[in-house]
Amino acid sequence: MNPNRRFLYEVLNRGLDLEMISPGDVLAHVTPDVLAHHLPIALKAKLLQASLNAERMTPSLVVEVVGVEALVEHAPLPVLWACVRVCVARQLQSHADDGLGSSLGIMPAGPAGPAAPAPSTTTSNGSGLAGVPVAVADDLQSRPAKPSRPLSFRPTSTPPRVSTLSPRSQAVRRGPDVAPGSAPTGSPTGSFDAARSEESPDFEIVEETDVPTRQRPGRLVAEDDTRPGSKP
Amino acid sequence: MPLPDSARQKWFAHMLGVGLDQKLLSPSQLVVFVTPEVLAHHLPPDVMSRVIASSLAAGQMTPDRLFETLSPDVLVDNVPLEVLWRCIDAGAERAGIAGEKAGEGIRS
């Protein structure tokens, strides 16, 4: 086995052992079409026979029957490497999601790159997988910021309802707690003098007069109403 | 449920180790990505101390000597995995594993 295939075999085999790669990941790249085109006849026959015996064909079965070594031996290396890339990207994203990747600090952009974080989200072959954590960061930055103000203070929301207070209603200011028998600190009349107040007053309604409301039209009685019944 | 970090690190360490064994990666290529600045930012004092002591004892500091001390296990423990992955991926591209485009080379 040549060094490149040996390397891929080790990466895939260990990735499957450690569950970094699933058989489904492998089959997502080493598709039935790839298998059909690249597996030798003997291996294809073995796969069909094993599936018939098991009465099923799953990614696990395919990987188990064909074997990683044969996959690496026969499948195109770029296809297998694309599988590794996807799984690594997932792991790096998961790593970042765990909060462990937040302290990246220094990341060179490439062989000649400085120590600054790489802004690119694509690899040299355009797959975009090697830069997933950067893409995640970009995605986070592109999301609109949530308003910090509560809903009730947003300009588009309905203004808070203010109850009607009759002009004849009286309000007194709640002064600080006073000892029984001592004079209250408010106005002698009990009315609040707002002009002299330096702090925002705290009101207490002591009398409230109902504001006259219009009668509903249906209850109005016309002068020429001739219907039976008492009139107001 | 997130995977245990140790499994992820084991896989990366294995990729690095095999990459070095199979000559897809070399210490001089590693140091292009795992730069002195990266090391200075991420190596804890005890590991940095070992690097310096080893180089002082040998009277030289070369990428080979550096990555003798900084084994794949030590690297994955201390250097951001993103940095290591870029190095591995670049090695795969250099070796022609990645190809120009994943999917090329499929015989029709």
Image: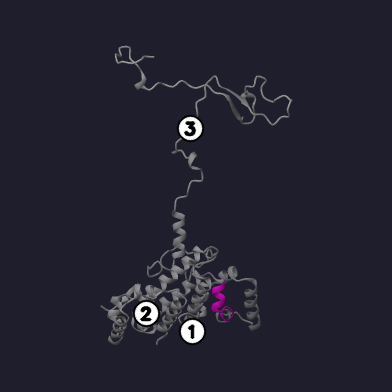
Find the magenta span and give its range.
B67-77
- Of tags 2 and 1, the one toward the viewer is 2
Label 3: chain letter? A
- Alpha-carbon distance for marks 2 and 3? 67 Å
Q: Amino acid at mark 2?
A: Val
- Alpha-carbon distance for marks 2 and 1? 26 Å
Q: Is residue B24 above or below residue A90?
A: below
The dominant secondary structure in magenta is helix
Q: Amino acid at mark 3?
A: Arg
- The residue beneath circle 1 is B21
- Identify the disc placed on residue A63: 2
Q: Is residue A168 above or below residue B94?
A: above
In what quadrant of the picture does the N terminus of chain A appear?
A: bottom left
Residue A230 in picture, x, y percent from top left: 36, 15
Under circle 2, the secondary element is: helix
Query: B56 or A180: which is nearer to us?
Result: A180
Q: Is residue B32 visible?
A: no
Under circle 3, the secondary element is: loop
Q: Is circle 3 on the same chain as circle 1?
A: no
- Identify the disc placed on residue A161: 3
- Label 2: how many Cα within 10 Å (few below 14, some 14–19, many 20+): many
Residue A36 in picture, x, y percent from top left: 28, 79
